[in-house]
Image (cartoon, rainbow, N blue to C red):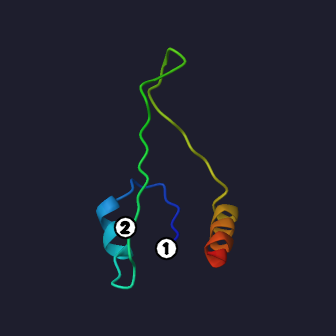
Amino acid sequence: MISITKEPIDLCKILLQAMDRSVGGITFFIGTVRDHNDKESVSEIYYEAYKEMAEEKLLKFKMKS
């Protein structure tokens, strides 16, 4: 399952989609943003991606595994 979105990520929805009796386990890595960096205040984080290229790279990676 590969998905790039601008919407908030619904972990319960992803877990339900990933559940399969043939799968031995599911692992999530969930990161959060600290409120500081090098003694400076952090109030937000911004990510950007070239969606088409990112999806292509993720699909190639998925095919290898």
x%, y% of residue 58? 63, 67
Spatial CA distance of label 2 from label 1 is 9 Å
Q: Which is more N-terminal, label 1 or label 2?
A: 1
Amino acid found under the numbered disc labelled 2: Ile
Residue at the outermost bottom position? 22
Badge 1: residue crowd in 10 Å (few <14, some 14–19, many ≥20)? few
Q: Are marks 2 and 1 in contact (CB under 8 Å)?
A: yes
Q: Which residue is mark 2?
A: 14
Q: Quadrant of the C terminus?
A: bottom right
Badge 2: residue crowd in 10 Å (few <14, some 14–19, many ≥20)? few
Q: How many marks?
A: 2
x%, y% of residue 56? 68, 69
For mark 2, give the secondary structure. helix
Please indicate whether residue 6 sits to the left or right of residue 17 in the image.
right
Q: Which residue is mark 1?
A: 1
Question: Can you tell which quarter of the image residue 61 is in?
Answer: bottom right
